[in-house]
Image (tube, rainbow, N blue to C red):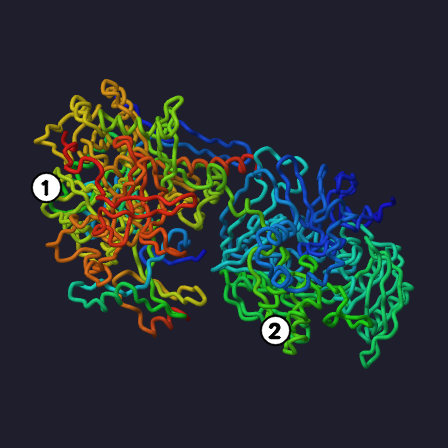
């Protein structure tokens, strides 16, 4: 097999040969190649199978717009990636790539039967085909569709790579390093402004890299490019980011740039991140994204070997690869003629240039004649042949009246097509910038801008090198000036540029049955011209609907090569002008982007903040099992060797009830409220009265929203007359402080009171059980712990084990209890000393699960578990906590709204199951009549449910409509296996007289 | 004496190769959140023994005492550990005539110093605003990756992060990741 | 990510430092008990939800921690201006000036 590599041509580094594999076969390439160029150099055109019809597909383009040549790549163990575009993947030594969407092999694919059954797969096929019978859905259609859907295979193991992110600020960001972008960045860079230039390709230069004719300022294009790069490299104010795709343009000139750091390296440095997401905030932005060539739409335009003419030119000039020995060209635009000329000069035998236009500029015809190329103008293309690679093309003359004459077959081994060029307005469109329809060019162009941005070059519809350089320089200078710098656009002299023109076409006229033509518009989603016409016939008139019905432009390429062709055909079918049919919305990201790049550092252990208490390490060393509670991880239970969770909880509960347990309550939110108006502020915020709370005393407080529903609760201690220590729920800490600040700052700014979060200042050790006081008494200084001096609901300041403490007497278990607050850094040492001293009482560390069980036995609610934002204090059996004499507090007025007074409000009740061994599922729905017809009327749900070792049976809390009046009634809890019965009881299951609090 | 447990104690990251960078947990100090009517800044400055900054974002330093103005009525104060109680006493005296709130947050926070020519680059991994634009001798509250911090630019290439202790591991983890990139110059 | 000018810090800061806090200029009634059920319902639940200029509250939660007011266009998402809590709603000529 001879190589198609042409000696002396291209920009690849011939001193750096590499070897890679494709479908297991080893091939040579060079550094600087893409996988596509290296495959073409090895005469490989067949690269994959299409998504729906499994048609053989080759390489369409030479850039990021590629819809066809998607491959799976492996960069070592665990580093498999599907759907990589072969046209942007740089080859390196050891690269392994595989084709997709076929079985058993690329050349013989069973799925290709779909191609013969195409009538089943026309537009909207999945809406029509899989309608009935209903029973087929779960068993036949769903698995079938799931099996067939999707591109490529998912990776099977977690991504071992790391990803980075970086914020940057600059004066001018230039996107695209083609001639327009380079001219812009040179101008802006010379002004001294801080510049970032990014380009998705490995090498700067854009279209210049594929161009060998142009001359700029007396230099060849490539020499000018080198001088431009040198000048940029010498500017310390310019950051150049190759291999960096601007994926999205967000508010106020924030752009996301995804930089590929290691994908092109055979052996990346250990620990090097694979990609970095730059979040760049620029004062000014210049968009020089260039343009994308449109395919022509004709039967068989998807066969391997059929490619965009501009791509063939890139492969030749940039990579030194001849895409065929006998290429034919079909076009509606002058630019394809240049590809033919370049190939002819590289010793290819160009079979013919077929131009659909009746008239073509004389100089092109003369050049073709000079190179001995046959020219057919005013001809159409009606088909191609060749099973795995194009072997011939059918072309037909079209009369002035539009009559298609008899076909002629031209043998070829590559077919180069051009339907003209589409400006890349994607990023501009992300900004909601207005797009104006240009009738003459049949293209959308950037119109009125919404951000500080400028478009330049082909991306702005200004085609040609001279226009790109002039517009780029002007945009770069203007951007620098608007960013506060002095700049003036240089003029560029461009040599030997010929103006290029063309027309835009719908699907080309044909002499065959158009309903059988497979003229592809969207190659990646296998959408043909007739699919779009069918959609219109079936009543879809807006491009947004046509897009969704046909899936045109909905593949991972977002229709880069298909949107405008699709629109032209839809516009013709609807018989309305293109702008009236509309353009679909471009959305970020511009090209497919890895999840890793978006996540950046936030994966694995850094996925989210894991807050740990000062005592967490002790819990870990002592075998705790953890559970997440908001951002915290909390000790859930402490199993002893051989214990399961059930046994551990039962043991922990028993220890607290019978002797002494210790619990890490450090995660509780804490707010220090200080100032002469502190009590008044609490009066207004909480339902309870606070003015008369004595110094050294605490009270349980309930916080409502203005709507009257419970938001939070906690114990509040009065440390001094002007200083309160407020506790909140673990998850509510930030929310409660924000709510308090809101009222203080905006409703009552006159109050002299200030709020400070002290959640992390204190480690909190709860000591609960009949022996709690006995443990504490010898360890605490300057607080009298006697029953008289320090009764239930007290707070005092003193010292414990040598550390300062704010000691609370309070209970969330129903037992005598204390909460020892010590400054956080002392938390673990004090915990250890208490644990040691508590051995005489068999002190037992317990976790959140035991805490939940113990509090449920007492009917103490957990806000957010037993309440859901729709419960009033009365609903939650907390009516006693309302200071009825207070004129006002947040939420008070809502408590007398008519809806709040209804008898059938859901109220918190206790449940005892008929079978004491049944532990109901939390969240299970409750019905009154289990024999009623479906759907049943649900009257409430289980909010908390546990096995109570203390009571030797299960207990549950639930909210039930009018629940309190139903005490003693039996309710039913239907579950998939059986329906459970339970009796409604009060919410307090254990020690209703609260005797144990002071026992 | 009780052993004090500190999330980052003794930890240090040093990059010497490409761009010098040193990241270290700093010694503990006394820290307070001071909330007071800005009209009484003179009395508060007297109590603290340091002129409190008058603009949000400004920092004043005298000896080992430092004050950052975080908001219209909020200052973040640091001082040597030994002065903790004296400072509380001095402000308690002021309270009778000028009510305010002084809350000890010394154990809430962990200090991390990021120093070197690559300090800015390291911090740009997680801070969304233009930290290059803030002058040395200023500070503010902000977000680093997913954690709220107080950031003080102590010198051109030296920053101090104050972060709640349970967020310190996360901040450290991000700094560690970005330090590797800086070390291998990628 | 939006850039928001905090009227207290007098600086533009990234959106991550802020939280949205609902419509502005809805003062809590001095004595809610005087309100009818209907009036209280309106205070609680009824908001203007305009297409276009919206007066709203933000908090510089992870900065100076102040609540403040902003005028934002709900179509373009662009801020017209921000101002301190407690200041009156800007009049049309002030908004025009801020827009230009």
Mark 1 and mark 2, same subunit? yes
Where disc 1 sits, the SS reads loop
Task: State the image coordinates of residue A361 (x, y, percent, origin top left).
Answer: 81, 73
Compared across the picture, whether A77 is left or right of B61 comes to right
Q: Residue furthest left?
A: A788
The quarter of the picture where residue B5 lies is top left
* Residue appearing at x 82%, y 76% in the figure: A358
Compared across the picture, whether A407 is left or right of A110 comes to right
Numbered disc 2: what chain? Answer: A
Mark carried by residue A144 = none
Quadrant of the frame with the C terminus of chain C: bottom left
Quadrant of the frame with the N terminus of chain C: bottom left
Mark 1 Cα within 10 Å, few/some/many (few <14, many 20+)? some
Q: Which residue is mark 1?
A: A694
Can you tell which of label 1 and label 2 is closer to the viewer? 2
Q: Which residue is mark 2?
A: A539
Q: Nearer the viewer, residue A450 or A680?
A: A680
* Residue appearing at x 61%, y 34% in the figure: A269
Distance from Cα at disc 1 to Cα at disc 2:
76 Å
Task: State the image coordinates of residue A398 (x, y, percent, origin top left).
Answer: 83, 75
Numbered disc 1: what chain? Answer: A
Task: State the image coordinates of residue C64 (x, y, percent, origin top left).
Answer: 31, 51
Along the polypeptide, which appears first: circle 1 or circle 2?
2
Q: Residue furthest front?
A: A931
Q: Can the viewer see residue A219?
A: no
* Residue appearing at x 38%, y 24% in the figure: A643
Where disc 2 sits, the SS reads loop
Asked if residue A6 is positioned above or below residue A760 in the image, the reply reads: below
Q: Nearer the viewer, residue A727 or A255?
A: A727
Q: Are marks 1 and 2 in contact (CB under 8 Å)?
A: no
The quarter of the picture where residue C79 lies is bottom left
């Amino acid at each position: 097999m001879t190589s198609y590599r042409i000696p002396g041509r291209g920009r690849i580094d011939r001193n750096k040969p590499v070897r890679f594999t494709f479908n297991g076969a080893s091939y040579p390439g060079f550094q600087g190649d893409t996988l596509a160029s290296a495959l073409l150099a090895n005469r490989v055109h067949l690269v994959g199978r299409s998504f729906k019809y499994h048609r053989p597909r080759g390489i369409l383009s030479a850039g990021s717009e590629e819809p066809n040549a998607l491959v799976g790549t492996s960069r070592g163990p665990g580093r498999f990636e599907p759907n990589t575009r072969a046209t942007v993947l740089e080859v390196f030594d050891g690269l392994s790539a595989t084709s997709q969407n076929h079985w058993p092999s690329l050349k013989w694919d069973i799925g290709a039967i779909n191609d013969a059954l195409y009538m089943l797969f026309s537009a909207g096929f999945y809406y029509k085909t899989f309608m009935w019978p209903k029973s087929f859905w779960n068993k036949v259609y769903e698995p079938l569709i799931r099996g067939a859907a999707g591109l490529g295979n998912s990776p099977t193991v977690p991504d071992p790579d790391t990803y980075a992110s970086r914020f940057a600020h600059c004066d001018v960001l230039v996107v695209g390093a083609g001639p327009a972008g380079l001219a812009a960045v040179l101008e802006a860079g010379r002004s001294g402004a801080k510049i970032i230039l990014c380009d998705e390709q490995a090498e700067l230069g854009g279209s210049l890299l594929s161009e060998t004719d142009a001359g700029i300022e007396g230099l060849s294009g490539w020499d000018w490019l080198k001088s431009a790069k040198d000048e940029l490299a010498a500017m310390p104010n310019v950051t150049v980011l190759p291999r960096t795709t601007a994926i999205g343009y967000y508010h106020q000139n924030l752009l996301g740039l995804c930089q590929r750091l290691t994908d092109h390296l055979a052996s990346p440095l250990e620990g090097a991140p694979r990609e970095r997401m730059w979040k760049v905030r620029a004062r000014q932005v210049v968009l020089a994204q260039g343009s994308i060539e449109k395919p022509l739409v004709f039967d068989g335009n998807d066969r391997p070997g059929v490619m965009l003419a501009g791509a063939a030119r890139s492969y030749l000039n940039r990579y030194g690869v001849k895409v065929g020995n006998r290429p034919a060209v079909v076009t509606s635009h002058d630019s394809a003629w240049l590809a033919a000329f370049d190939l002819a000069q590289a010793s290819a035998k160009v079979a013919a240039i077929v131009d659909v236009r009746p008239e073509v500029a004389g100089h092109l015809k003369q050049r073709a004649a000079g190179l001995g190329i046959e020219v057919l103008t005013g001809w159409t293309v009606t088909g191609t042949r060749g099973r795995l690679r194009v072997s011939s093309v059918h072309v037909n003359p079209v009369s002035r009246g539009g009559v298609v004459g008899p076909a002629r077959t031209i043998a070829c081994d590559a077919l180069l097509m051009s339907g003209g060029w589409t400006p890349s307005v994607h990023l501009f469109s992300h900004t909601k910038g207005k797009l104006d329809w240009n009738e003459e060019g049949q293209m959308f162009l950037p119109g009125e801008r919404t951000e500080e941005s400028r478009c330049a070059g082909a991306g702005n519809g200004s085609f040609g090198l001279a226009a790109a350089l002039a517009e780029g320089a002007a945009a770069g200078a203007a951007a620098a000036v608007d960013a506060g710098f002095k700049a003036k656009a240089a003029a560029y002299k461009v040599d030997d540029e010929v103006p290029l023109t063309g027309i835009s076409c719908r699907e080309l006229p044909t002499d065959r049955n158009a309903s059988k033509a497979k003229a592809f518009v969207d190659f990646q989603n296998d959408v043909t011209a007739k699919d779009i016409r069918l959609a219109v016939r079936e009543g879809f008139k807006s491009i947004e609907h046509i897009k969704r019905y046909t899936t045109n432009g909905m593949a991972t390429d977002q229709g880069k090569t298909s949107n405008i062709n699709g629109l032209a055909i839809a516009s013709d079918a609807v018989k309305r002008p293109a702008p009236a049919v509309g353009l679909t919305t471009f959305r970020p990201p511009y090209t497919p982007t890895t999840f890793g790049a978006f996540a950046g550092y936030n994966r694995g252990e850094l996925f989210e903040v894991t807050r740990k208490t000062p005592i967490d390490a002790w819990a870990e060393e002592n075998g705790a099992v953890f559970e997440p509670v908001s951002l915290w991880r909390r000790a859930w239970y402490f199993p002893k060797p051989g214990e399961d969770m059930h046994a551990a909880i039962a043991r922990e509960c028993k220890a607290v009830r019978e002797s002494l347990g210790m619990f890490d309550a450090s995660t509780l939110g804490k707010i220090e409220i200080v100032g002469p108006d502190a009590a008044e502020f609490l009066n207004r915020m909480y339902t309870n009265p606070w003015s008369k709370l004595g110094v050294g005393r605490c009270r349980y407080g309930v916080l409502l929203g203005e709507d009257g529903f419970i938001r939070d609760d906690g114990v509040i201690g009065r440390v001094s007359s002007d200083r309160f220590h407020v506790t909140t729920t673990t998850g509510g800490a930030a929310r409660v402080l924000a709510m308090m600040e809101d009222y203080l700052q905006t409703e009552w700014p006159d109050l002299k009171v200030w709020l400070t979060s002290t959640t992390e200042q204190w480690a909190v050790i709860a000591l609960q059980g009949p022996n709690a006081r006995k443990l504490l008494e010898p360890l605490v200084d300057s607080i009298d712990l006697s029953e008289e001096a320090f009764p239930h609901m007290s707070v005092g300041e003193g010292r414990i084990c040598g550390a300062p403490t704010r000691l609370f007497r309070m209970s969330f278990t129903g037992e005598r209890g204390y909460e020892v607050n010590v400054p956080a850094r002392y938390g673990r040492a004090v915990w250890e000393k208490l644990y040691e001293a508590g051995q005489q009482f068999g002190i037992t560390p317990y976790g959140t699960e035991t805490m939940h069980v113990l509090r449920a036995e007492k009917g103490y609610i957990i806000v957010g578990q037993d309440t859901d934002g729709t419960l009033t204090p009365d609903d939650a059996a907390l009516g006693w906590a309302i200071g009825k004499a207070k004129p006002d507090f947040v939420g008070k007025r809502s408590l007398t709204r008519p809806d709040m007074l209804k008898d059938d409000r859901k109220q918190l009740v206790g449940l005892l199951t008929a079978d004491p061994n049944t532990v109901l599922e939390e969240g299970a729905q409750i019905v009154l009549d289990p024999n009623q017809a479906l759907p049943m009327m649900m009257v409430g749900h289980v909010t908390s449910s546990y096995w109570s070792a203390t009571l030797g049976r299960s207990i549950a809390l639930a909210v039930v409509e009018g629940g309190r009046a139903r005490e003693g009634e039996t309710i039913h809890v239907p579950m998939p296996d059986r329906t459970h019965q339970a009796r409604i009881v009060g919410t307090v299951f254990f020690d209703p007289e609260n005797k144990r609090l002071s026992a | 004496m009780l052993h004090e447990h500190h999330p980052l104690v003794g930890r240090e990251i040093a990059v010497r190769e490409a761009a010098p960078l040193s990241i270290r947990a700093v010694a503990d100090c006394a820290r307070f959140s001071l909330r007071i009517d800005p009209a009484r800044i003179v009395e508060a400055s007297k109590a603290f023994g340091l002129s409190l900054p008058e603009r949000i974002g400004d920092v004043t330093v005298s000896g080992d005492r430092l004050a950052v103005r975080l908001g219209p009525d909020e200052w973040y104060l640091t001082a040597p550990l030994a002065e903790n109680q004296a400072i509380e006493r001095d402000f308690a005296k002021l309270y009778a005539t000028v009510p305010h709130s002084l809350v000890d947050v010394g154990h809430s926070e962990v200090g991390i110093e990021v120093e070197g020519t690559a300090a800015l680059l390291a911090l740009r991994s997680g801070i969304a605003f233009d930290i290059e634009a803030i002058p040395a001798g200023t500070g503010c509250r902000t977000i680093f990756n997913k954690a709220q911090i107080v950031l003080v630019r102590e010198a051109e290439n030296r920053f101090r992060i104050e972060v709640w202790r349970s967020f310190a591991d996360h901040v450290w983890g991000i700094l560690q990741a970005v330090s590797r990139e800086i070390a291998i110059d990628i | 990510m939006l850039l928001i000018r905090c009227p207290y810090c007098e600086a533009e800061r990234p959106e991550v430092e802020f939280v949205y806090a609902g419509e502005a200029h809805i003062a809590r009634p001095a004595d809610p008990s005087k309100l009818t059920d209907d009036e209280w319902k309106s205070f609680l639940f009824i908001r203007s939800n305009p297409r276009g200029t919206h007066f709203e509250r933000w908090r510089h939660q992870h900065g100076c921690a102040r609540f403040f007011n902003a005028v934002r266009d709900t179509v373009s998402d662009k801020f017209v201006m921000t101002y301190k809590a407690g200041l009156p709603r800007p009049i049309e000529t002030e908004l025009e000036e801020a827009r230009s």
